[in-house]
Image (cartoon, rainbow, N blue to C red):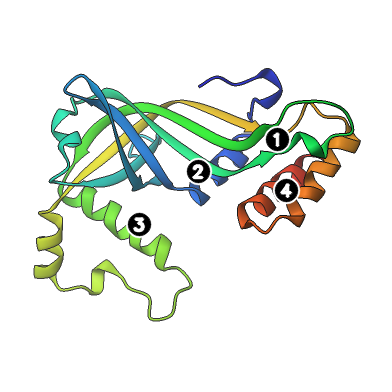
Amino acid sequence: MYIHRLNQWENEPEVIDFIQKNAFATLVSQVDGKPWATHLPFVLDKNHSGEAVLHGHLAKANRQWKSIRENEEVLVTFQGPHAYISSSWYNHENVPTWNYLAVHVYGKIRIIEGEELMHHLKSLVDIYEEGRPNRVHVETMSETYVEGQIRALVGIEITIKEVQASAKLSQNRDDYNYQNIIHKLEESEFPMDKELADEMRKRRS
């Protein structure tokens, strides 16, 4: 991923938090010599060796997993809030642009089964059922039902080898224009614009 030097995002706790909050990501690998992308939720975890991993699952009917070779390098992309930045918001002539936050994770992939796949499913459900009324647990589902569902899935674990993170948030603007961009985003009717304004305010109050 191209990252301008001003947009390099190297705050590890922030990047981890971003991945966890934007966990519905895109898995990219090669299928029959062409790029193939699947959109799915991931869980950020650690394996038995203490290495950072992402684990998830695909539908068994999805061709992507059949082309995965053990320890093949794959890409997972995470995208956060983004917004169009109008050049009318500046006090000088300039071009429009787009602000965004994005993280690319490269890692070695392997298929997981049995207890490892069950651990993933329990973790995923527990994370997204947290705080919900009448929350669901995999453990309370019937064994027959769970086994039937698992037969339709293929689990994956990606050992993280490289993380590239970009926070393109108008860092090249002076304080007046930076604050005006925040103000204009906060005025927007689009929720994602307001989210991006929050991210900009965190970095320059």
Q: Are marks 1 and 4 in contact (CB under 8 Å)?
A: no
Residue type at numbered disc 2: Ile
Residue at (34, 39) in percent of width and height = 47
Provide the secondary structure element on which disc 1 rests. loop
Percent coordinates x, y for residue 88 in the rendering: 80, 37
The answer for how far apart the CA atoms under marks 1 and 4 are is: 9 Å
Q: Are marks 1 and 2 in contact (CB under 8 Å)?
A: no
Question: What numbered label is drawn on residue 129?
Answer: none
Residue type at numbered disc 4: Ala
**Which sits earlier in the primary sequence, circle 1 or circle 4?**
1
Question: What numbered label is drawn on residue 169?
Answer: 1
Q: Residues within 10 Å of mark 1 (few under 14, many from 20)?
A: many
The answer for how far apart the CA atoms under marks 4 and 2 are is: 19 Å
Q: Are marks 1 and 3 in contact (CB under 8 Å)?
A: no
Q: Is residue 45 visible?
A: no
**Which sits earlier in the primary sequence, circle 3 or circle 2?**
2
**Which sits earlier in the primary sequence, circle 3 or circle 4?**
3
Query: Mark 2 sits on what residue?
Result: 19
> Viewed as shown, does residue 72 lie left or right of 44?
left
> Viewed as shown, does residue 131 lie left or right of 51?
right
Query: Mark 3 sits on what residue?
Result: 124
Question: What numbered label is drawn on residue 197?
Answer: 4
User: Looking at the picture, does residue 138 appear above or below residue 39?
Assistant: below
**Which sits earlier in the primary sequence, circle 1 or circle 2?**
2
Provide the secondary structure element on which disc 3 rests. helix
Camera-side mark, 1 or 2: 1
Residue at (61, 52) in percent of width and height = 192
The answer for how far apart the CA atoms under marks 3 and 2 are is: 14 Å
